[in-house]
Amino acid sequence: MRLPERSVLVLTSLAGGDKHGYALLKDVEAFSGVVLSPGTLYGALARLEEDGFVQRLDADDRRYPYRLTPAGRAALAERLAESARIASLGLRRIALAE
Amino acid sequence: MDRLLAWVLVLYPRQMRRRYGPEIAELTLDLIRLEGRSPIGLFVSLAVDGLRCRMTWFARTRLTTAIAVTTSVVCMAVVNMGAASAKQPGPPPERVRAHLRSAEPEPETARRLQGAGRPDYLWGAHVTVRGRRRSVSAPGH
């Protein structure tokens, strides 16, 4: 199963530690420049939780922090390795063409 | 604003609304309060995401149903095929066996029976069944 881009952003953010919705949005915006809307964020979180890649922790106030599971970490590692391989190939080809 | 937010959240699938609705509402209000984002823009974005979520959810549910139905049909077909192939012709009923025991082959038929490896050697032969002379006919005749 191929992870969508927004899921990769959410998992990458959670790889840095547990976060609730607002912190996730700000972190994703800071490291990627992508501004997720609340609906997009929770759509991705719902799918990731259903797939067992993230876990919702107990709420503090009305905010639930989310945590990356071992399965989520493995899926993210696989996806990033694939992206890195494609990026490396692309960069080599660009260098050859110049 | 809370009422408008509640209306927009109705666009999301029920399961998602129940689990994540309060969090989505809280995050939206945080973005308005803390960052001064435009409520109209956020609500429109929420509505579009809600419709998209609903369509995705609907498509996944239909796909799951289609897979379940197909699997059931295939399983039933396999079970039926197995049952059909397992059906072997059983021994003849007692009435037929008694009938055959009562048959006395004529001398010519007896000779054929001794040398015959194939049942069609018997077709046309004569036997006596309960005192009445009968000929052995091929199946279907």
Image (cartoon, helix red, strand yellow):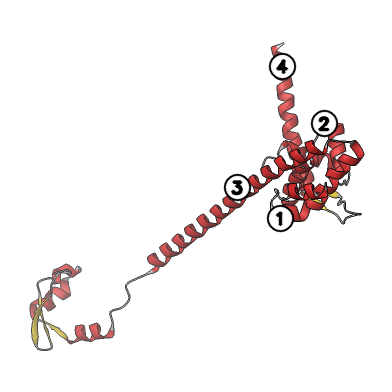
* Residue B1, percent from left and from top: 83, 46
What residue sits 16% from the left and 72% below the top? B115
Q: Circle 3 marks a residue in which chain? A: B
Which amino acid type is shown beneath numbered disc 3? Ala
Q: CA distance from mark 4 to mark 2?
A: 23 Å
Nearer the N terminus, badge 4 or badge 2? 2
Residue at 82% of width from left, 39% of height from top? B39
The answer to which of marks 3 and 1 sits earlier in the sequence is 1
Q: Nearer the viewer, mark 3 or mark 2?
A: 3
Choose between B21 and B86: the one closer to the eye: B21
Observer-nearest of B4 and B24: B4
Label 1 residue SS: helix
Residue A7 falls in which quadrant of the image? Answer: top right
Measure the C-alpha gap from mark 1 to mark 4.
47 Å
For the residue marked with disc 1, what is the amino acid?
Answer: Gln
Crowding near the residue tagged with mark 3, few <14, some 14–19, many ≥20 C-alpha atoms within 10 Å = few
Quarter holding the C terminus of chain B is bottom left
Distance in Å between CA atoms under marks 3 and 2 = 30 Å
**Which residue is under mark 1?**
B15
Q: Are marks 3 and 4 on the same chain?
A: no
Q: Quadrant of residue B42?
A: top right
Residue holding disc 3: B59
Q: Which residue is mark 4?
A: A94
Q: Disc 2 vs disc 1: Cβ atoms closer than 8 Å?
A: no
The location of residue B40, given as percent across then percent down, is 79, 37
Marks 3 & 4, CB-CB < 8 Å contact: no
Judging from the image, mark 4 belongs to the subunit labelled A
Q: Residue furthest top?
A: A98
Residue kind at label 2, given as amino acid type: Ser
Q: From the image, tell me which residue sits under label 2.
A: A32
